Image (cartoon, helix red, strand yellow):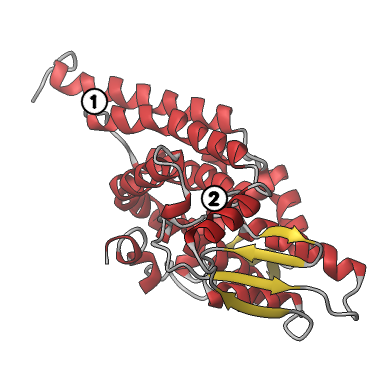
Amino acid sequence: MPHPTDPARTAPDRDGAALSGRIDAALARIAPRARSLIVTVFGDSIAPHGGRLWMSSLIRLMAPLGVNERLVRTAVQRLSAEQWLRGVPVGRRSWYGLTDAGRQRIDAVYQRIYAMRPLPWDGAWRIVLALHPTLTEAERSTLQREFGWLGFGGVAPGVYVHPGIAEAVLQSTLAELGLSGKVVRMTARCGDLAGDAALRDLVLARQDMAAVAALYDEFLAVFTPLQQALADGAALDGEQAFRLRSLLVHLFRRALLRDPQFPAAMLPADWPGIAAQALCRDLYRQVSATAQAWLATQLEVPDHDRAPPPDAAFHRRFVTALEG
């Protein structure tokens, strides 16, 4: 048996402590809000296992991420009021799960996270005309906000353009807003490359791409050292893996929600989103199995002795859409 001072025994402990310190530093630098971080954990770790768990289990999951019980309960109340979550009392306990609306919101965002890549462009533009006379000011404002998140450029009042968004995403967004019958959707092509360039510049002018690039640069600055530490042989236990994976997805989501995700033909060659996506994919794969093993010991769900295994979509994360 190795002696307690044997380097073969002590080095992993030192490396593990150093890695834990790096994760602590990442958490402090990211400074996530409790509500937003709980959404991240639900989307990344709870939704694949049925999307519900006991409150006590959620409190345990959030503690390593620096969210105490009071903050968890307050955030869950807000998420319930906003129709993300619903709570069900069972005796003296309560469990919380995703509502149908909460599941749809999470699926829409997390499909983009786990399958993001600069797509090839077929030259088609999505154009939406929000000019119907029955549109209220509140509906116009909501549409402008949601289309902003999706990366549409408002090139004129009530006219929105995007070069690559999937038709299914557009349809589901309009259906969720209840505006399918009040807007006109069309697909169009410019007559020549000069027209494409002019429309591209018009759309890009409506986007703060410098701010998006800064978010990706921040992601790379936070997680590249952690990736290097693991490459150098640092030990990683289950709780550390869960913390790292959760923070990885959380910060990547923060950048992705600001990113219009234009096709590769419209991005500069040094666009940091490409490197950030590759880092997120590689680091996620590296720590996921260890995080999942720890999660299985912590995740308590109603009506089951243990959490159900992750669904099929979980096993396609960062695999099929990126490499198929």
**Residue at (28% x, 32% y) in the render:** 230
Describe the element under mark 1 as helix, strand or loop. Answer: helix
What numbered label is drawn on residue 256?
2
Give the CA separation, mark 1 to mark 2: 34 Å
**Residue at (52% x, 67% y) in the render:** 301
* Depicted 257 relative to depicted 4: above or below: below
Residue 167 placed where, x, y %?
55, 76
Sequence order check, earlier mark of 1 and 2: 1
User: Which image quarter holds the C terminus?
Assistant: bottom left
Crowd rating for badge 1 (residues with CA inside 10 Å; few <14, some 14–19, many 20+): some
229 left or right, relative to 305 = left
* Depicted 137 relative to depicted 252: above or below: below
Residue 45 placed where, x, y %?
47, 57
Q: Nearer the viewer, mark 1 or mark 2?
A: 2
* Depicted 18 relative to depicted 231: above or below: above
What numbered label is drawn on residue 12?
1
Which of 245 and 126 lies nearest the eye of the viewer?
Answer: 126
Q: Say if residue 300 shows up in the picture.
A: no
Q: Say if residue 162 shows up in the picture.
A: yes
User: Which image quarter holds the N terminus?
Assistant: top left
